[in-house]
Amino acid sequence: MARIATRGRLGLLLLVVLVGLAGTGLRRLLASPGCARVWYEVRSVFGPGPGGDLVLEVDSLAGVRLGDPVYAHDPARGARPLAHVAWLSAPGTPPRIGVRGAAGERLPPHARLHRLEPTRRLGESLAKAVPPADREAFAARLGERALAVWREALEPELGRRLPAFLARLDPERDPATRALLEGLGATLWARLDPLVGELTRAVRKALDDELGFLDRMGLLWKVATGDDKGLERKVLPVARAASERWWEENRGRVLEAVGGALAAHRADLLRWAGAQLAGAARAELLEPVLAQQRGRLEAEAEALLGEAADAFVRGPDGALRVRFAAVVRDALLGKRSALLLLEPREGP
């Protein structure tokens, strides 16, 4: 009996200890920031939050539901919601949204609410995930780095290898290039020959008119024998002006003739570009330059991928950026809810 009594007292003592520990844990849990946030959100469902709700006008209520999270427009604020949708305006009235701040968040007195539609197309997803200002800034940095790589690594190496590339395409050494140029030249000359004849006749007529006038005035002999530049000063301006007039009137015909000649040899040009040109570029320029500068190019590519991830994918808090996460949600889960971003403003 004594043993049973002792065991009962130990059990009672253990129960008291467990109750005490549970009470202490419960008090700590109730005093924790997480529990305070939960309690705040529960209370906010049944009444306005401290300071009332922020009423915002939007273009439409499509894709917006009660309880939807509202995030900061500034990605530096991270992925934690600033508020949630507390109420929506009635149908038939101007679309407005009541936004209620989350625990510990103080909403600005004046703000604009961006409502971003769910996306399905690649272009729309890119515009949603990457704001225009961020896209332009990243494009500028990308251009600067690409230009630096070109000037420091690629341009000098390509310049050293360009003579070998051009030698591979020399018509005196490459029968295919020579045959292409001969055929193209013959076709081009056949199409341009009548136009060249017209130009020659136009210039000759202008010279005849000018020199005939000088001859009738008795000045041609004097101009021709005055000095070795006298006739040149009269002939060249007239010939140049006549050529310019003819070109302005017949430019379209010349370009059409050149285009027709190229079109007639389109198959030959494509075949030559795919074999001789591409082969020479690959053997003399692309492969050697990539082999020589592989380390630099890989380092630049890795750095750019890291910058792109920081700029568009990974937020300051290490989580996915809100915009990128919304695009992933749209694509993978097929959600139809809008993304709401709150941007502070100076005035109403």
Image (cartoon, grey):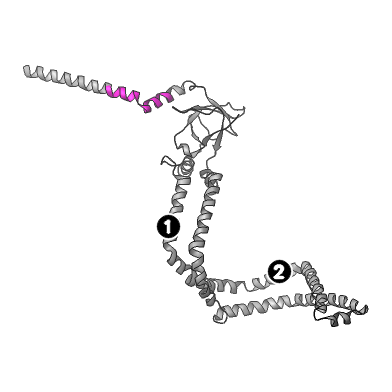
Compared to residue 247, the image places residue 92 above or below, namely above
What SS does tag 2 mark? helix
- Coordinates of residue 202 in the picture (x, y in percent): 82, 74
- Coordinates of residue 29 in the picture (x, y in percent): 32, 25
- Residue 172 or residue 76, whichever sits in front: 76
Residue at the extreme right: 217
- Coordinates of residue 204 in the picture (x, y in percent): 82, 77
What separation in Å lies between label 2 and label 1 (alpha carbons)?
46 Å
Three-letter amino acid code at the position of disc 2: Leu
What SS does tag 1 mark? helix
Horizontal side of 315 relative to 169 (left or right) equals: left
Compared to residue 46, the image places residue 76 above or below, namely below
Res 255 label: 2
Compared to residue 269, the image places residue 222 above or below, namely below
Give the mark nearer the N terminus: 2 vs 1: 2
Mark 1, residue position: 299
Three-letter amino acid code at the position of disc 1: Ala
Q: Look at 54% across and 75% down and name the residue there.
A: 166
- Coordinates of residue 117 in the picture (x, y in percent): 54, 39
Horizontal side of 348 relative to 153 (left or right) equals: right
Q: Look at 51% across and 68% down and name the residue there.
A: 158
- Residue 262 or residue 164, whichever sits in front: 164
State the quadrant of the N terminus: top left
Principal secondary structure, stretch drawn in magenta = helix
What is the span of residues highlighted in magenta in the rendered image? 24-40
